[in-house]
Amino acid sequence: MKLEGLIAAQNRLAVSHPSLPVLASKRFSVEAGIGGEERVAEVFRKDSLPFEHRIFHDLSPSSVEQFQMDTYFMTPWYGFVLEVKNIGGVLEFKDNPAQLIRTREDGQRDGFDSPVVQLERNQELLSAWLRGRGIQLPVYGAVSLAYPKQIVAVPPAKTKILFPNLIPSYIRSIPQQTKKLDIETFNWLSGELLASHQRFIPKPICESYRIPFGDFQPGVRCVTCGRIGMIKLPRTWQCPFCETMDHCAHQRTLLEWFLIFNRRITNRECREFLGVDIQTAKRILTSMHWQFEGTFRNRSYIMDFNNIVYDQTKRIFVFR
Ligand SMILES: [Zn+2]
């Protein structure tokens, strides 16, 4: 969602817009993060571990505080949390103050929040989440660097650093105590974790980067050629550039609205953003079955992010 918002924003700003470099560098780091997590996921897909386990990617259980685990590996004996980092260059893990320093090839140095602190926080919050359900389970953790091109000059004092292909053998080396969860409890716990998952919804781009609303080009985007300006025909949309017909085009453009501007939308805003008349806007907004607030004239519809799923084959978000 974060990446989707950044791409949508980039594509709607003029090429000379002063915010573009900031958005581009943020997009680069989000893509690197996703790439790293996918690499770790790939290792788990290839290696079948010979005992009962569940693997959760990008899990955000709701607890006293919200927390997010890049990868969580759970067995009836223990839990294992992985914090995945994809930051290129020579890395130094500092303890006091906790920080990650990266030196690039050209000698430039950048500081990052310590993944060790992030990992320890996740382990504590997960343990608390488990205790809240009457479960005592040891929770181990490690930081995974996605690529061996990441060179560790100074490792953290107490935390294990793993490249992805070392993860399975490390997991095999974790002792399995005699005390373990019975299979019913283990399955129940897996279900509880999924049920507790809260989807991460990023702040609108306008708000995060303080970009004025009027700087963004309105219009419906064509999913085939990426250009903005699809034309409304009865029951469908047509792209004037590549002639693609798409009866769902307004849905993805509405998602862009929410990611760029605001969690809610009025009929007037919908009209202006999609370039349609008042009746069409009303029909479109009603068809989404969103909750709304306010009376007819200033009614605003509230986006329901739970209705959106990621289509892995088309690599786009779609409304259910
Ligand atoms: Zn097109």
Image (tube, rainbow, N blue to C red):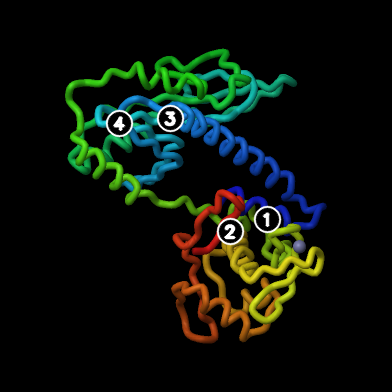
Quadrant where ligand 1 appears: bottom right
Q: Amino acid at mark 4?
A: Glu
Spatial CA span between label 1 and label 4? 44 Å
Are the residues at dot 3 and dot 2 in contact (C-beta closer than 8 Å)? no
Q: Which residue is mark 2?
A: 259
Spatial CA span between label 3 and label 1? 31 Å
Q: Which residue is mark 1?
A: 9
Spatial CA span between label 2 and label 4? 39 Å
Q: Comparing marks 2 and 4, which lies closer to the viewer?
A: 4
- Residue drawn at x 60%, y 48% is 3
Q: Could you tell whether 128 is left or right of 28 in the image?
A: left
Residue 123: x %, y % from top left: 34, 32
The crowd level at tag 3 (other Cα within 10 Å; few <14, some 14-19, many 20+) is: many
| Count of all numbered marks drawn on residues in the image | 4
- Residue drawn at x 49%, y 34% is 41
Q: Comparing marks 1 and 4, which lies closer to the viewer?
A: 4
The crowd level at tag 4 (other Cα within 10 Å; few <14, some 14-19, many 20+) is: few
Q: Comparing marks 3 and 1, which lies closer to the viewer?
A: 3
Based on the displayed image, in which of its 4 quarters is residue 291 positioned?
bottom left
Q: Which residue is mark 3?
A: 82
The crowd level at tag 2 (other Cα within 10 Å; few <14, some 14-19, many 20+) is: many
Q: Comparing marks 3 and 2, which lies closer to the viewer?
A: 3
Residue 84: x %, y % from top left: 50, 31
Q: Earlier in the sequence, mark 1 or mark 4?
A: 1
Q: Earlier in the sequence, mark 4 or mark 3?
A: 4
SS state under label 4: loop
- Residue drawn at x 33%, y 32% is 53
Q: Comparing marks 4 and 3, which lies closer to the viewer?
A: 4
Q: Which residue is mark 4?
A: 52
Q: Amino acid at mark 1?
A: Ala
Q: Could you tell whether 266 is left or right of 25 in the image?
A: left
Above-or-below relation of 143 to 278: above
